[in-house]
Amino acid sequence: MRDLLITGAQFADGSTADLGVSAGRFVAPSEVHDAEHIGADGLLALPGLVDSHTHLREPGREDAETVATGTLAAARGGYTAVHAMANLDPVTDSAEAAEHLAALAGRTASAEVIVVGSVTKGLAGAELSEMGLMHRSAAGVRMFSDDGKCVMDSLVMRRALTYAKTFDAVIAQHAQDTRLAGPGACCHESEISGRLGLPGWPAQAESAIIARDVELAQLSGGRLHVCHVSTAEGVEVIRWAKARGVNVTAEVTPHHLYLGTREVERYDTTFKVNPPLRTDEHIEAVRAGLADGTIDMVGTDHAPHARQDKDHPFDIALPGMLGLEQALAVVIETMVNSGRLDWPGVVRSMSAAPAALTRSATQGRPIAVGEPANLVLVDPSARAVVDRDDSASKSRNNPYHGRDLPDPIVATIWAGRITHRR
Ligand code: NCD
């Protein structure tokens, strides 16, 4: 691996300095030898982004994504680490499954893969998975989630929070009360669900579970993370819980910051996602929540799906959309360009906070001599029309296709290695 010399870049706080990279770490520029020069005049240098919520699909659905393609998509989006969700086949519910994924990542990944274990065996919601064994395994699991499914049983959720607390792990909940919606619920319950004749999810299916879970976090003293908050009511409950000192963090997806119910007017299944796209008042609420820190971080919920799983009537198609490659673009468009989030805020919500979820020692760190060289070079003013075929992902369910958006990622460096360069 060749040394790097990066000159001219500016940091999130507005300061500038040249950067040396050697043996995977930042070093003083005078310390590099035979270095490859990267001229970064006019660019921002930010710590490598960390995704709190990625679906990599391997093992099980390698036709939709693999660890190799998903982490390459991550690198193209400026990410140097992703939390790999457990809804794989087989489910990541044992030490063996966790170690298998970690080993696979060791061989094929272009970003650090932080393994997430399931809360319950087979995501069935009944019996706790081997959480302690997964934590003590070589995969060192520190986050557990049945994401894709809500842990509905209150006692199971209580036990998970209580047990995870003993080794400082976090329980990430997909907050969606399945008992509050009829079968086939597939969009936001509102004027649009009635007009389109599609069964809907009320906002309260999300906020009611968040309310229960913050009470359980309080009761157990455990650490709760709320996945993909999408409703004004959900943000309000989290704001209330934080004011009471509950140990809770939350994420919002790029698509819930940017896209709304109008996208489903044409029954295009690209826009079917869980939780569903919401109305303007909810979009405004999640933006405000991210701006004031009620929502701690951006998690992409990158959910690749093969064409045959999307080419169905809207209520039957699988939910989920891509997110890694355009996440920063959407955050710049919705939050930075509108003045609601500054660059230190971007660093906090897209690198430091998600890295802190699983107590990473290598990610979300400042750009400083001696630190692991995880870096993204950003051109904040470049724009382009998104083309879903210009992607490292195996899937094409890109909701930003055809839109004019920022095109910020110039280069990504993971542990001193260039993983993407435009
Ligand atoms: C996710 C998936 O496809 O794995 N789908 C989605 O609509 N977001 C599961 C999830 O995160 O809910």
Image: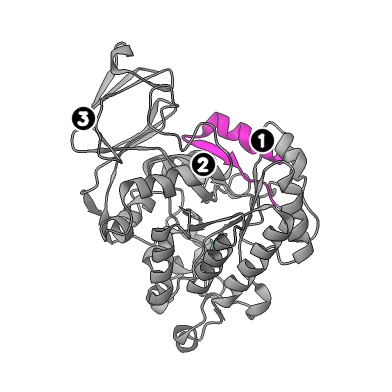
Task: Give the residue displayed 54% in from the left and 32% down from the top.
Answer: 361
**Quadrant (top left, top right, bottom left, bottom right) of the C terminus:** top left
Q: Residue furthest right?
A: 127
**Residue 132 vs residue 334: left or right?**
right
Label 1, on which residue?
Answer: 140
Is residue 391 placed above or below 184 in the rendered structure? Answer: above
Q: Is residue 87 left or right of residue 287?
A: right
* Mark 3, secondary structure of its residue: loop
Is residue 319 toward the left or the right of residue 345 in the image? right
* Residue type (three-letter) at the residue carrying disc 3: Gly
Q: Which range of residues does the magenta coloring cover?
A: 96-118
Quadrant location of the N terminus in the rendered image: top left
Estimate the spatial distance between the alpha carbons at disc 1 and disc 3, rounded to whole Å: 38 Å
Residue at which label 2 appears? 355
Image coordinates for residue 272, horizontal then vertical, percent: 48, 69
Residue 192 is situated, as x and y percent measured from the top left of the image, at 44, 84
Mark 2 or 3 closer to N-term?
Answer: 3
Q: Quadrant of residue 79?
A: top left
User: Which residue lies at the image location 52% right of the left edge and 32% below the top edge?
Assistant: 108
The quarter holding residue 5 reads top left
Give the residue drawn at x 75%, y 52%. Answer: 162
